[in-house]
Image: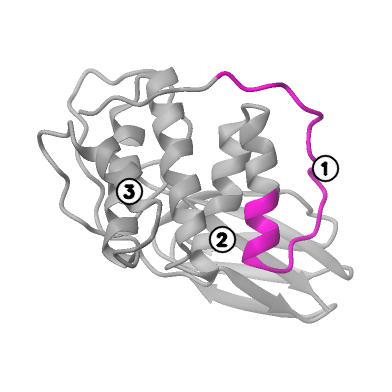
Amino acid sequence: MFAFTVTMLVMLGAPDAGTTFTSPAKLLEEAKRWKRVGDYERALSLMQTCLELEPNNLDCLLATASSLARRGMEANSDADTYQAEVAYRRFLELALPDDKRVPRVKAILASSTEPPAIGPLRIPPPPRGRANRPFIPPSDVVVMPARVTVPLKGSKTVPVSTIVKLENDNPGAVDATLADPAKLQLTGRKAGVANLKLFDQDGSWHAMRVDVK
């Protein structure tokens, strides 16, 4: 694997978890604030939504890579380290040759002895300790919408794939239930926004923002 240099960070006030995000730039700004206070789970959740809205966003790719690298080093997680490398290599694929960040990214990857095959970037869930088996790179991500609009007092069914559980940060606005592992039922209770985390069988998860209007 490869080594990362971690800079000591000054603890700042925690961001507002209830902020409504309307653009990838705002998502990334808030994600960086959570990253600065060491909350990589919140930061990566926002970064994942940013990349779902703009998969080729170079700023978000780099922020995601560095966050995964730091979390991987702190938790000794092969999954995070692998996906950090995927994100860095994706950045090199997309960046222009004269991008000033290219040499730094190449230097980070220089010590990698077994570069991963470039596939879809997938942000693993928070590590829960090292497994007793080697890390196996994940399969392709099933594309699901990053944003869904549901009418107030109305319902919508969204096709998903093998989702085994979900988390909803605003059940008062949106009732979200799994009719079965491949169908997500959304009902708008009141105007507002809910952020969902949809967990696949392998523990990875997909972020979905639901707007009730």
| Residue at image location 44% in from the left, 67% down from the top | 55
Which residue occupies the foreground of this view, 151 or 118? 118
Residue beneath label 2, please? 50
- The crowding category of the residue bearing disc 1, from other C-alpha atoms within 10 Å (few below 14, some 14 to 19, many at least 20), is few
* Number of disc labels: 3
Q: Residue 16 carries which label?
A: 1
Residue beneath label 3, please? 88
| Residue at image location 31% in from the left, 33% down from the top | 81
User: In terms of secondary structure, where does tag 1 sit?
Assistant: loop
Q: Which of marks 2 and 3 is nearer the N terminus?
A: 2
User: In terms of secondary structure, where does tag 2 sit?
Assistant: helix
Distance, label 3 to label 1, CA atoms, is 29 Å
Q: How is the image coloured?
A: one colour
Does the magenta portion include 17? Answer: yes
Distance, label 2 to label 3, CA atoms, is 16 Å
| Residue at image location 55% in from the left, 52% down from the top | 47
Assign the magenta stretch its main secondary structure: loop
Q: Position of residue 105 (x, y in %)?
A: 32, 45
- Closer to the eye: label 2 or 3: 3
Q: On the rendered image, what quadrant is the C terminus found in? A: bottom right
| Residue at image location 78% in from the left, 54% down from the top | 171
Which residue occupies the foreground of this view, 203 or 127? 127
Q: Earlier in the sequence, mark 3 or mark 1?
A: 1
